[in-house]
Amino acid sequence: MKATLRGTEIYYDIAGMQLVPTGKTIVERPVIFLLHGGPGGDHFRYKKHSLEFQEVAQLVFIDNRGCGRSKKTKKTDYTLENNIEDIEALRQHLGLNKICVLGTSYGGMVAQGYAIRYSRYIDKLILVATAASYRFIDEAKEYLQQHGTPQQIAVAEHLWKGNFKNSKEVAQYFRIMDPLYSMQARQQKKGVYAKPITAFSTEALNQGFRECLREFDYIPHLKKIRCPTLVLAGEHDWICQPSQSKIIAANIPNARLKIFKKSSHGIAVDVHQQYIKIIKEFL
């Protein structure tokens, strides 16, 4: 499905019921927006590892503008600001009073920005393997210098500079970096990030690392988030290190932090059952 919002078309899909018949009564489940990573990814990873959440909530999957099945626009449109405002526009489009929001990696950055600006419309917030400020980039570079292979250090330069030429180069980046993104990939030599169902938006990825991800800083504003918040981190996450999640949890008044010892960035894959369990209980 596509919604015409703020001068573009945003693709979204829905799984699960909001109103559930139980005997002679009806139970209203929360509606949760799932915000994907990248910048430049799409919602399909959630359909591969998070569908169990429809047992306790109605799920709304979203492709950011210019990503996945959403309409391609000019690259200067691919900003954190637009992604935040598109979420609010979709909430209004769907006629929802309050929503829950789950954001993973870059999606967690969008989710924090949305929660800071539109706190009154959020019931619960879940932040998975994400960061609170641009400082995560320097931390990731330092980690890579200490733990990465020469090939990984070299290919990551495309990410830091935002100069991928096409989706094939992005796919090659993930093939090389996969063992750092997921401990399961490291142990089983099984691609987790390297085989996306749809191609990454090279333009959105480049634009993010050239512009907004180099300057955003939510830390002074996190105290504005008043809803119950669950913060999940992987102890071995190289790109959004646990230090960032600790900062988030320390600055959001109603936040709970869980760090998974046997996980890297791909929490939903590395510790799948724990990931499902803790979020279902929170919802």
Image (tube, helix red, strand yellow):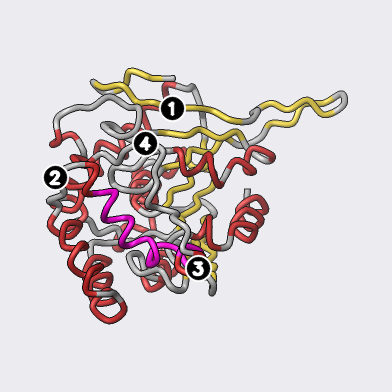
Which residue in the protein does label 1 denote? 12
| Proximity of marks 3 and 2: CB atoms separated by less than 8 Å | no
Q: Secondary structure at mark 1?
A: strand
Mark 1 or mark 3, which is nearer the start of the sequence? Answer: 1
Mark 1 Cα shell of 10 Å, populated few (<14), some (14-19), many (≥20)? some
Left or right of 66, for residue 13? right
Which residue in the protein does label 3 denote? 263
Q: Secondary structure at mark 3?
A: loop
Residue 244 against residue 215 in the figure, above or below:
below
Mark 4 or mark 3, which is nearer the start of the sequence? Answer: 4
Residue occupying image coordinates x 69% and y 26%: 19
Q: Position of residue 144 (x, y in %)?
A: 27, 74
Mark 2 or mark 1, which is nearer the start of the sequence? Answer: 1
Q: Position of residue 202 (x, y in %)?
A: 21, 42
Residue 155 against residue 27 in the figure, above or below:
below
- Identified by mark 4, the residue type is Thr
Which residue in the protein does label 4 denote? 198
Span colored in magenta: 170-185
Q: Nearer the viewer, mark 1 or mark 2?
A: 2
